[in-house]
Amino acid sequence: MDIRGKKINFLGDSITQGCGVVIPGNIYHERLASEYGLAAARNYGIGGTRIARQTKPSLYAEWDLDFVLRVDHLDPDADIIVVFGGTNDFGHGDAPLGTMEDRTPFTFYGACHTLCQKLIEKFPEALIVFMTPLHRLQEDNPRGDGYKEERGPLKVYINILKEVLEFYSIPTLDLWACSGIQPKVDVLKEKYCPDGLHPNDAGHKLIADRLAGFLKTL
C-alpha cells in the first residue's frame, strides 16, 4: 500500500517513545512521517509498559498502563495502527503465560487476544499491523531482567504473540528475524543498540526501513 498521506497510530513502549535516540526526528515513526509524507504519526509509546495486565502494582505506576487499557485513548481516525510491544512482558511482567484459550488481560495469551479484539472493534476499517520484539542481551534468561518468576525466554513470548496474530490474520513484521539488530554480536550492539535493549538513531533507521518496506507489501 501507499502510505503517503496516511494517519498512523503507534502503540508501544520505550522504544516507540524514543528511549535511546539522540535526535527525536530519528525515532522510527518520525522517520516514516518525514520520508513518506504521513499526514500524522502519533506516538503512543510509554516506557516500561506491557501488553498484559499485572495483578500487583509495578515499581513505577506508568508501567501498569498496559496496551489493552490504552486502546481506548488512541485517536479514532487512524488509517493504520502499528503495535510494537512484548519485550517488557518478558522483562519484568508478572502475568502468567496462560493458554491459547484465554481471553483475559491478566495472562499474556489472553492479553494478546484482548488487544487484538479491541483494536479490530475500534478500528474496523483500519490496517492493523504488529511488530515483534527485537533481540536483547538478556533474551535467554527465563526470569527476564532477573527479578520475576520464571516464565521462559523472550522467544516464548514472541511465539505466543505470533500464534495469536495468526489466529486473527493480522499482518506481523518479524523484527526478531529480520531487523538486523542483535546486541549479542558486539559489532551490531555498538552500531545499533549500545545498551543491549533500546536501538539508537541508526537502529531506528533500520526499523523504519523494515516497516516501510513491509507496509508497501500490504
Image (cartoon, rainbow, N blue to C red):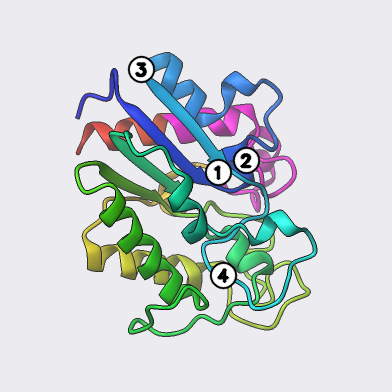
Q: Which residue is mark 2?
A: 188
In the depicted structure, whether residue 40 falls above or below residue 74: above
Q: Which mark is residue 181?
A: 1
Tell me the element at label 3.
helix
Q: Are marks 3 and 2 in contact (CB under 8 Å)?
A: no
Q: Mark 3 sits on what residue?
A: 36
207 in the magenta segment = yes
Quarter of the image holding residue 16?
top right
SS at mark 4?
A: loop
- 83 or 144, which is in the foreground? 83
Residue named by callout 4: 53
Going from N to C along the chain, the mark reached first, 4 or 2, is 4
Q: Which mark is residue 73?
A: none
Q: Position of residue 1 (x, y in %)?
A: 19, 30
Q: Which residues are magenta?
A: 181-208
Whether residue 149 is situated above or below residue 2 in the rendered picture = below
Camera-side residue of 74 and 116: 74
Q: CA distance from mark 3 to mark 4?
A: 35 Å
